[in-house]
Image (tube, rainbow, N blue to C red):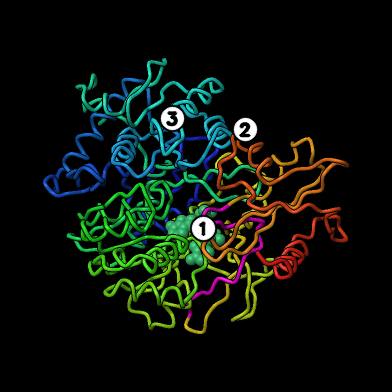
């Protein structure tokens, strides 16, 4: 049997239909190689070159390969096998890179959790995908991840191994990544060579911002994810001596694979890992390590520009090495792009419209300035089928705004184990309905107008209002709640909770936040403003009119200064 139509062996993964798989292979998008087929030979051939730079160390390709190999053999000895799921919650540190490629060596699937996730999110992911492993730092800032890991282990029978970047406690199943790296492996490389890893299986589980309940799990196959990286890398002018600064969490699709870590390693170049997104840290790191490329959310750019304007020492830091600034995740004002180009004298800003589900659009570096500054560009692949449609899923006339729906060689055909969601978020012929509203610019590029999804975009982090509302409703003082975005000059949006309280009850935003913390909800999802309402406006169908709430709030904001 040929490759065409071969589906993943993991139940719950929706395959590409055979005729599409065949076409994507024939047209050269899918190379039928796994991440381990591609990266391990590269670690050997570039052995002496620097691959990863972190605060206190430089790591060569050879060292990345050797450490990933050693870790993989230890993980095999601990029972991790192809298609096993491991929840990875590591910050921007070299251990992330070792573990990511160790799991690739095994054909296991890392689920890309984010450092701010807490018991509510991690517990759900571990349970939902049946994870056998969970990787954490020992602590991050003031937060004790070991304590979180203990809570998770207590509630998760599938979880056998907790990998700790840092010293591990004596609890059963907990082991330090550093200790494993220091110890000779108990298993030979031939054992791992013999593991069957298919390019149609998932290489990673990404997370969607999601609109329903808890964010959904996105399976990305080796074929589609490698193509994803190659496709966007070709518009980034990456040269072997270049360096990408990674400041947003590395587990995001953007810095991991678009082109991100994967794209810079494929080019034989370096990544510089910054655990801090503060301008004072990141700008100095750019100068000292001669960073050439940035991948940033608009909120980070704005923060750096603001810090720089307030601090003459920071303003004098040499940013001349940067040539390419990719921004994405959220709308970015053209004027701010211009200011960024002033601060980085040799750089061009190039906007990316991306999603963990797949589709990538990008403005090209040689596009005219108005296209680069005012649009998000166009798809990276000729086989990306992009349509803008109305509520009946009929294409809108040229130039009119419509919901973006998409099908293509690196866009998912279904969320993992979510048949009901899939039935509503995909058309019968397999287009993913993004919920984003775009318009086609006369130049053939796209402009983002808004969205139909009930999501809040806080500095590029998507928050499912339904998830937060469900939890707020469990508060004994609350009878009704609707979370709506409020505009914010830096983050784009923040969350405001409009609540109807039980008679005689009171609730402050701080009290609500403490309640949500106790419930294990990640901090970035907490409402930052609470509005007490006597009732919530309803549509004739009985749905909460969030547009009206937003209008009420903005009226209030204007009339109530401060
Ligand atoms: P996620 O679900 O976290 O992968 O986020 C993907 C979503 O981020 C997209 O569906 C858009 O809503 C939003 N997004 C990504 N890039 C941009 C951009 N350049 N401009 C506006 N929104 C964006
Ligand atoms: O928001 C995103 O998910 C995103 C933005 C820019 C993304 O996944 C990407 C580029 O790859």
Q: Quadrant of residue 338?
A: bottom left
Crowding around mark 1 (Cα neighbors within 10 Å: few <14, some 14 to 19, many 20+) is: many
Residue drawn at the location 61% of the way across and 42% of the way down? 214
What residue is shown at x 60% (from left), y 57% (from top)?
Answer: 494
- Picture quadrant where residue 258 is located: bottom left
The disc label shown at residue 459, or none? 1
- Picture residue at 23% right of the left edge, 70% below the top: 320
Residue 117 image position (x, y, % from top left): 51, 40
Q: Position of residue 77 (x, y in %)?
A: 31, 20
Percent x, y of residue 88: 42, 36
Q: Could you say which disc has been placed on residue 134 in the image?
A: 3
Q: How many marks?
A: 3
State the CA–CA distance, disc 2 to disc 3: 21 Å
In the image: residue 82, left or right of residue 396:
left
Say which element carries label 1: loop
- Residue occupying the point 43% across, 27% down: 133
**Label pair 2/1, CB-CB below 8 angstroms:** no
* Sooner in the amino-acid sequence: mark 1 or mark 3: 3
Q: Main secondary structure of the magenta part?
A: strand
Residue 294 falls inside the magenta stretch: no
Mark 2 in CB contact with mark 3 (< 8 angstroms) = no
Q: Quadrant of the C terminus?
A: bottom right
493 up-or-down from 441: above or below: above
Q: What range of the chain is rendered magenta?
A: 444-462
Instruction: Name above or below for residue 266 compared with residue 192.
Output: below
Q: CA distance from mark 2 to mark 1?
A: 24 Å
Q: Is residue 154 left or right of residue 554?
A: left
Q: Is residue 169 left or right of residue 456?
A: left
Of residues 258 and 534, the one drawn nearer to the viewer in this rendering: 534
Mark 2 or 1, nearer chain start: 1
> Which quadrant does the N terminus fall into?
top left
Which residue is under mark 2?
518
């Amino acid at each position: 049997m040929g490759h065409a139509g071969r589906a993943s062996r993991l139940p719950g993964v929706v395959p590409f239909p055979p005729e599409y798989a065949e076409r994507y292979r024939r047209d050269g998008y899918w190379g039928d190689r796994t991440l381990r087929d591609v990266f391990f030979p590269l670690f050997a051939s570039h052995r002496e070159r620097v691959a990863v730079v972190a605060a206190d160390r430089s790591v060569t390709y050879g060292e990345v390969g050797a450490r990933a190999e050693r870790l993989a053999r230890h993980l095999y000895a601990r029972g991790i096998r192809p298609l096993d799921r491991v929840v990875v919650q590591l910050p921007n540190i070299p251990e992330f890179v070792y573990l990511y490629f160790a799991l690739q060596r095994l054909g296991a699937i890392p689920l890309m959790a984010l450092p701010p996730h807490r018991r509510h999110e991690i517990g759900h992911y571990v349970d939902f995908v049946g994870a056998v492993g969970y990787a954490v730092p020992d602590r991050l800032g003031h937060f004790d991840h070991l304590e979180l890991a203990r809570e998770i282990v207590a509630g998760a029978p599938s979880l056998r191994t907790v990998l700790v970047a840092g010293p591990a406690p004596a609890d059963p199943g907990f082991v330090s990544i550093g200790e494993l790296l220091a110890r000779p492996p108990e298993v030979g490389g031939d054992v791992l060579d013999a593991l069957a890893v298919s390019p149609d299986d998932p290489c990673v589980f990404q997370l969607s911002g999601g609109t329903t309940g808890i964010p959904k799990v996105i399976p990305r196959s080796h074929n589609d994810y490698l193509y994803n990286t190659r496709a966007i890398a070709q518009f980034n002018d990456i040269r072997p001596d270049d360096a990408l600064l990674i400041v947003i969490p590395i587990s995001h699709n953007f810095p991991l694979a678009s082109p991100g870590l994967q794209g810079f390693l494929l080019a034989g170049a370096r990544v510089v890992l910054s655990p801090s997104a503060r301008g004072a840290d990141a700008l100095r790191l750019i100068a000292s390590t001669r960073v050439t490329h940035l991948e940033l959310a608009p909120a980070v750019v704005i923060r750096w520009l603001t810090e720089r304007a307030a601090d003459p020492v920071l303003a004098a830091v040499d940013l001349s090495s940067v040539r390419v600034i990719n921004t994405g995740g959220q709308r970015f004002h053209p004027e701010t792009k211009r200011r960024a180009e002033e601060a980085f004298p040799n750089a061009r800003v190039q906007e990316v419209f991306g999603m963990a589900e797949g589709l990538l659009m990008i403005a090209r570096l040689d596009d005219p300035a108005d296209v680069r500054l005012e649009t998000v560009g166009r798809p990276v692949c000729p086989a990306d089928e992009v349509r803008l449609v109305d509520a009946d899923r009929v294409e809108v006339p040229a130039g009119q705004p419509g919901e973006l729906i998409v099908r293509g060689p690196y866009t998912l055909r279904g969320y993992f184990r979510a048949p009901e969601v899939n039935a509503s978020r995909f058309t019968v012929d397999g287009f993913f309905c993004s919920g984003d509203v775009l318009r086609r610019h006369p130049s053939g590029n796209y402009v983002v107008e808004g969205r139909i999804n009930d999501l809040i975009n806080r500095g590029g982090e998507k928050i499912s209002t339904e998830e937060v509302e469900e939890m707020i409703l469990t508060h004994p003082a609350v009878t009704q709640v609707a979370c709506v975005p409020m505009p914010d000059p830096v983050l784009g949006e923040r969350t405001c909770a409009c609540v109807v309280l039980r008679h005689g009850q009171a609730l402050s935003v701080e009290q609500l936040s403490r309640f949500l913390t106790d419930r294990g909800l990640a901090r970035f999802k907490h409402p930052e403003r609470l509005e007490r309402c006597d009732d919530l406006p309803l549509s004739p169908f009985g749905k909460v009119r969030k547009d009206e709430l937003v209008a009420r709030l903005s009226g209030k904001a204007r009339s109530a200064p401060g």
